[in-house]
Amino acid sequence: KNEAVPTTATASAGAGLRAGREFAEHVPIEPASLIQERAAIDMLCDLKHVMLDLGHDVQLRTSYIELQPADSATTKAAAATTLVLLPGFDSSVLEYRRLAPLLAQQGFRV
């Protein structure tokens, strides 16, 4: 029997989310709701999905996180720099759950 898997959760669903936050669309609730670490939960809430057209009728669905630089005078030089963090095979964007926010705090667009 094929049943639809719910893809969003709210704080009331017991998923460890802060009030008013939801997991990003396409994030399955069941495995995601088992995650306890705040940095991973926050990243799953901000996850974006896009379909890339590779040509010859081939499409690839991928996901990404975009963090804007912190806005302070000490980070203006870094703000002009965008960093692209690519996880390796058999890994996920959650590999950068701690590093990406630190880089954004230093003024980088991640």
Image (cartoon, rainbow, N blue to C red):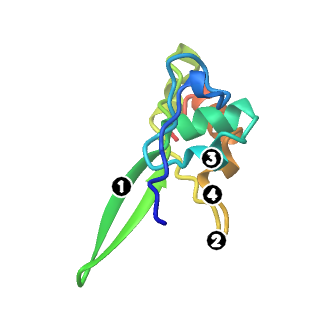
> Pointer 4: what residue?
92
Give the class, few, some or many, for how many residues have Cα within 10 Å of label 4's Cα (few <14, many ≥20).
few
Percent x, y of residue 76: 50, 24
| Label 4 with label 3: CB-CB less than 8 Å | no
State whether residue 103 appears in this view: no
| Kind of residue at disc 1 | Val
| Kind of residue at disc 3 | Glu
Give the class, few, some or many, for how many residues have Cα within 10 Å of label 2's Cα (few <14, many ≥20).
few
Percent x, y of residue 60: 38, 69
Give the residue furthest to the front: 1
- What residue sits 46% from the left and 57% below the top? 3
Q: Which of marks 4 and 3 is in front?
A: 3
Question: Which secondary structure lies at badge 1?
Answer: strand
Q: How far apart are marks 4 and 3 (CA)?
A: 17 Å
- What residue sits 32% from the left and 65% below the top? 52
Instruction: Specify the label residue 50 is tagged with.
Output: 1
Question: Which secondary structure lies at badge 2?
Answer: loop
Q: Which of marks 3 and 2 is in front?
A: 3
- What residue sits 58% from the left and 59% below the top? 86
Give the residue furthest to the bottom: 56
Instruction: Specify the label residue 89 is tagged with.
Output: 2
Relative height, residue 58 to residue 98 (above, below): below
Percent x, y of residue 44: 57, 40
Relative height, residue 50 to residue 47 (above, below): below
Counting residues from the start of the chain, the first of labels 4 and 1 encountered is 1
| Label 1 with label 3: CB-CB less than 8 Å | no
| Label 2 with label 1: CB-CB less than 8 Å | no
Question: Which secondary structure lies at badge 4?
Answer: loop
Question: Which secondary structure lies at badge 3?
Answer: helix
Instruction: Specify the label residue 30 is tagged with.
Output: 3
